[in-house]
Image (cartoon, rainbow, N blue to C red):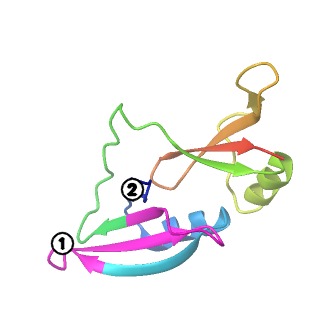
Amino acid sequence: MHFDHTMVRVLDEERSIAFYRSLGFEEVRRARVGGDTATVVFLGLPGEEPRLELTLNDGRTEPYVQGEAYGHIALTTPDMDAELAALAARGITPEKPPYASRPGGSRICFIRDPDGYRIELIERP
């Protein structure tokens, strides 16, 4: 076994792809699925396999209920301050300033994608 990918359902393809591009993701491939009722877009970070699948169900206009079981997607960055400055230039701000989750631990913070999914940024120099 190995971890393959995570899928999230999104409402606005362009808005979501633009958001994830600002985090460094690139579109790797896309396909029509579900008897031609949905589009899936696979995104990956440079040099890595695609690990994020955005699914757009045809005709869906109401936001999805994420439920209380969803937590977050986690990404690492070598420089939290530079990353947050680059994201701020694109209108993306953290929920609160970076902090260490435990004494001596890595700095972390959370942002949200256009559909409200939380993304944890972890500083690992």
9 or 14, which lies in front? 9
Residue 100: quadrant of the picture = top right
Distance Cα–Cα, label 2 vs label 1: 15 Å
Which kind of residue does numbered mark 1 sit on? Gly
**Above or below, comparing residue 84 to residue 33 in the picture:** above
At a point 32% along the width and 36% down the height, the residue shown is 67
Q: Which mark is residue 125?
A: none
**Which circle's residue, 2 or 1, is located before the other in the chain?**
2
Q: Residues within 10 Å of mark 1 (few under 14, many from 20)?
A: few
Residue for badge 2: 8
Region of the chain picked out in magenta, as a range = 32-54
Q: Image quarter for residue 42?
A: bottom left
Residue 114 lies left or right of residue 92; in this view the side is left
Give above or below for 119 relative to 13. Answer: above
SS of the residue at dot 2? strand
Q: Is 61 covered by the magenta stretch?
A: no
Which label is found at residue 34?
A: 1
Residue at left 84%, top 50%?
Answer: 79
Determine whether 18 is above or below 103 in the image.
below
Q: Residue at point 48% right, 47% down?
A: 117
- Callout 2: few (<14), some (14-19), or many (20+) C-alpha neighbours within 10 Å? some
Is residue 46 magenta-colored?
yes
Please name the residue shown 49% across and 74% down the image: 14
> Which amino acid type is marked by label 2?
Val
